[in-house]
Image: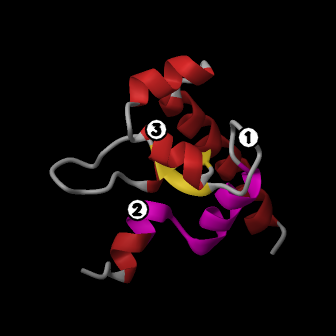
Amino acid sequence: MARTAAERLRIYGPPERVEFVQNLGCIICGQPAVNAHTATGGLSRKADYTTIANLCHAHHDESHRGVKTFERKYGLDLKAVAASVEAAWRVTSTQLTEGE
């Protein structure tokens, strides 16, 4: 089922934010990142964009095989990573807005 524009915006944020996360590179290996959610939105629902960490496809897939094991292996707290990504985005988006 295709997502509506409003759903995509809630899940991933504006296109500029998606690009921002991808340009950060994977927090583990530096490869191009995907927008990897670190939480669920409840019953078959994706969480909103504030829960996104920057992981490559391989590390994103690995995280889905066991988040706690993944976090221990790499010494990460994915929710803290997502909070850092959100904080960095807020600074960047403010700068972009002020530059207009």
Q: Earlier in the sequence, mark 1 or mark 3?
A: 1
Q: Is residue 33 above or below residue 64?
A: below
Q: How far is the residue under mark 1 from the one under mark 2?
A: 25 Å
> Secondary structure beneath disc 1?
loop
Q: Which mark is residue 6?
A: none
Say which residue appears at 77% left-offset and 45% top-offset: 30
Q: Main secondary structure of the magenta part?
A: helix
Q: How far is the residue under mark 1 from the one under mark 3?
A: 14 Å
Q: How far is the residue under mark 3 from the one under mark 2?
A: 19 Å
> Secondary structure beneath disc 3?
helix
Q: Which mark is residue 63?
A: 3
Highlighted magenta segment, given as a residue range: 9-25
**Amino acid type indicated by mark 2:** Ile
Q: Which mark is residue 29?
A: 1
Query: x%, y% of residue 8?
Result: 41, 72
Q: Residues within 10 Å of mark 3 (few under 14, many from 20)?
A: some
Query: x%, y% of residue 5?
Result: 39, 81
Q: Which residue is mark 2?
A: 11
Q: Residue furthest right?
A: 99
Query: x%, y% of residue 49?
Result: 46, 55
Residue 13 visible, this angle: yes
> Secondary structure beneath disc 2?
helix
Horizontal side, residue 20 vs residue 63: left or right: right
Q: Earlier in the sequence, mark 1 or mark 2?
A: 2
Q: Residues within 10 Å of mark 1 (few under 14, many from 20)?
A: few
Horizontal side, residue 70 vs residue 55: left or right: left
Quadrant showing the N terminus:
bottom left
User: Pointers 1 and 2 in contact (CB under 8 A)?
Assistant: no
